[in-house]
Amino acid sequence: MLAGSEKQSPTPGNPLARSLSQASGHADAIKVVQSRPDLILKPHNDLEALALAELAKSPRLAHFAPTFFGTHQLEGKLYMVMANLLYGASQAHVMDIKIGQRTFQEDEVTNQKTRMDLLKKMMDVKPDEPTAAEKEKGITKLRYMQFRESQSSSSMYGFRIEAVSVPAEEGPSLSQAQTKKFQSKGDVISGFARFLRGRRDAHSQLLIRLRLLRRELQASSWFQHHEMVGTSLLFVYDSNFTPTITLSPPSSSSSSSCAVAPHHTRTHTPTHTHTGPDKLSQKHDFLQQKVQTGLWMIDFAHSIPHHDTHLTHRAAWHAGNHEDGYLYGLDNLIRLWEEMGSNGSLPEC
């Protein structure tokens, strides 16, 4: 049971949670409860809470999303309660990958007004990018957002590395300021290598998870009817983990169930109810299983349902079709992940 007055630490005060915040950009938002280190509190968002609750009921996708325990009122603010995906990892390696070819919401770019402030932002990055006409009149928000995507790997590959956090004794991490300029295949592979630090066992287990995730997404009705913008894939492994599966991943066409080492196995099914201001439901009084390796979908604040539209997540986007390029990005991510381990050894970071 969690008392409402009990101490909660923002992520910078907790080494493992700090790794999560460094890799996912939520440094001031996520709180870790000192008495319940297996749980985190994240500011409530209606779309994200709905997505987490629905995914928890999905037989295909439940184990690819953080376990959701409803909401909790704290100091006048409403939070979502979910599993701490780094719980129990003593030497956590964390990588946040923003997935999807389109990283902006459609309603952000409907205004066709040209703006000189956006032109300045573009020219600060790449002075020779705008045309002569654009230099005179400014650029639209859509033009700027697509330009920004082209400066990372999002445009070409459909995903970008947001950040990488590794234990300090194993080398430097990668900040968002560094990774936002990653465009080429070589850039992406170097980011993967910084995360993996030569651990072929972690590479193999995560490749199995990636292939299984793609298979389950393609078969998921929930996924086919949700626009997925701004979501990430969170990769985690603990330096101290011991592999519990074969290190030879099945082929991408395999129809096997891809049994994998546990990453966050629930000890029972959570109940998605609003808890009172003073405590979390006693139904949640158990600890999550400690992490060894894991891959999760996170950040669903802009996961918009479209019940009358069947999304491919691979088709090119045009205004109003809601396509996001999620599977296009996942296809490329898996291909590059496979390529980096194809010669029997991982590249040096």
Image (cartoon, rainbow, N blue to C red):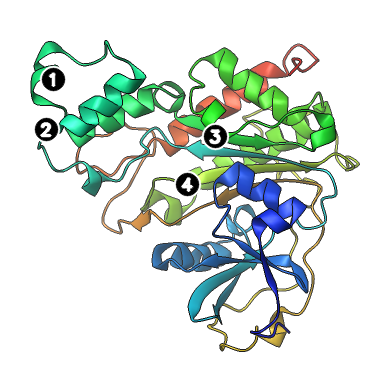
Q: Residue 132: x, y in percent?
A: 12, 12
Q: Residue 31: x, y in percent?
A: 63, 64
* Residues marked 2 and 4 touching at CB (< 8 Å): no
Q: Earlier in the sequence, mark 3 or mark 2?
A: 2
For label 3, the SS is helix
For label 2, the SS is loop
Q: Which of marks 2 and 4 is nearer the N terminus?
A: 2
Q: Mark 2 points at which residue?
A: 114
Q: How far apart are marks 1 and 2 (CA)?
A: 9 Å
The image quadrant that residue 264 belongs to is: bottom right
Q: How far apart are marks 2 and 4 (CA)?
A: 28 Å
Q: Name the residue under label 3.
A: 176
Q: Residue 83, relative to residue 136: is it above or below? A: below
Q: Residue 165: x, y in percent?
A: 69, 38
The image quadrant that residue 339 belongs to is: top right
Q: Distance between the residues labelled 1 and 3?
A: 29 Å
* Residues marked 1 and 2 touching at CB (< 8 Å): yes
Quadrant in the picture for the C terminus: top right
Q: Can residue 172 be seen in this view?
A: yes
Q: Residue 47, relative to residue 103: is it above or below? A: below
> Which circle marks residue 231 in the picture?
4
| Residue in view at x 42 percent, y 21 percent | 156
